[in-house]
Amino acid sequence: MTPLQFETAHAPQWDELQAMLERAEGSPARKRADRKADKKKGAIDGARLSVLYRRACEHLALAQARAYPIGMTQRLEELTRRAHQLIYRRHEPGFGIGRLRRLVLVDIPQSVRAHRGYLLVATLLFLVPTLLVGWACWRDPGFVLHLMDADQVRNFDQMYGPGPGSIGKPRSADTDWQMFGFYIQHNIGIGFQCFAGGLFGGLGSVFFLVFNGLQGGAVAGYLTARGYSTDFYSFVVTHSAFELTAIVMSGAAGLRIGHALLAPGRRTRLAALRHASADAIVVMYGVIAFLLIAAAVEAFWSSARWVAPEVKYGVGAACWALVIAYLGWQGRPRAAIDAKGTPDAG
């Protein structure tokens, strides 16, 4: 599709969005006149505004990817910026509670979905090595020594084996809190590595995603082959919903940074990096939140011996479903409902 064909096909939607924005952003006198007119012809349709905003974002992404004329991309950037400010402007007073609520319920899941291409690549980079090495270590437990030394392997045997030092044995409250702090430091360190590695053209993010996938697969395959699968999987099933998702999200944010540096388009590399960072940082807010939740669950729930493995599996499945639902559907605009109670197709 040529730039002219693209603009001809979508310009009516851009004009409609621009008219709605000008109406909503007009002077006080204009707004009073509009309110009087609204009583006769109806107020601005928020659902329609959201639809036009999402479509303008999609058109902007296409225009940038296809290197369409700069005037077109600048118009779309301006429209999406104004629409975003109008839709997500903060009305709530107080000490940032409204802003935090908006960040958690809208901005983070929407930003993650906007990075779905990078998220898919990061998932494959993490999951494929995990499955391949897990299968190799399950078939031949000695294969694990290709990826970690004997001391590390013995440590995992002690952690998940039947001995007195196994994970899940009752610990004092002080130790639980100490482990909570350790898990925070460890998890956030991994997330930061996957994200900051994007500054090396994305290669660092690729390396840390693959490396962590290899390590996790080796441990899972080895412990399964050793017969410790119940202790291991009941321990990791719950907090892994948050921890593994956060690792993949941080890797996706790092890949976004790396892509901006390698293919800045019409921007300078510095401008492209700034633009990509502004998008990726919202994803990283979600990463930090997920890693904090994972650390708390791992310290106080996963290690609880008094909880039956079947219960942990059930709670773990619920947590995975919650994470998927949150990232997949939370923050989507609600469809307008017409007088008959059916969704408005507009």
Image (spheres, helix red, strand yellow):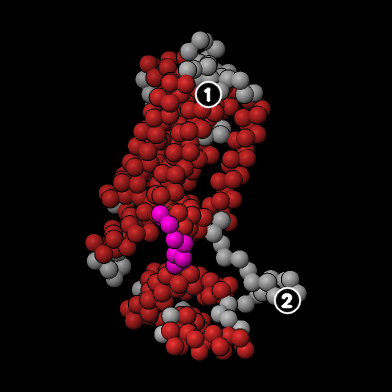
Residue 108 in view in this figure? no
* Amino acid at pointer 1: Ser
Q: Position of residue 256 (x, y in %)?
A: 37, 55
Q: Quadrant of the C terminus?
A: bottom right
Q: Nearer the viewer, residue 210 or 267?
A: 267
Secondary structure of the magenta portion, mostly?
Answer: loop
Q: Residue drawn at (32%, 63%), measured in percent from left and top?
A: 275
Point out the residue furthest to the right here.
340
Q: Quadrant of residue 74?
A: bottom left
Give the residue displayed 36% in from the left and 20% down from the top.
Answer: 149
Residue furthest to the front in view is 94
Instruction: Give, as a single range, the part of the protein colored magenta.
Output: 88-96
Callout count: 2
Is 91 part of what is drawn in magenta?
yes
Marks 2 and 1, how far apart at CA:
53 Å
Query: 295 above or below 174?
Result: below
What residue do we see at 61% from left, 20% from top?
A: 306
| x then y, percent, for residue 128 | 48, 40
Relative to 335, say whether 14 is above or below.
below
- Residue designated by label 1: 303
Secondary structure under tag 1 reads loop
- Residue 252 appears left or right of 261: right
Q: Secondary structure at mark 2?
A: loop
Location of residue 322 with respect to 65 vertically, above or below: above
Q: Amino acid at mark 2?
A: Ala
Would you identify the image quadrant in which residue 62 lies? Answer: bottom left
Query: Can you see residue 65?
Result: yes
The disc placed on residue 339 is 2
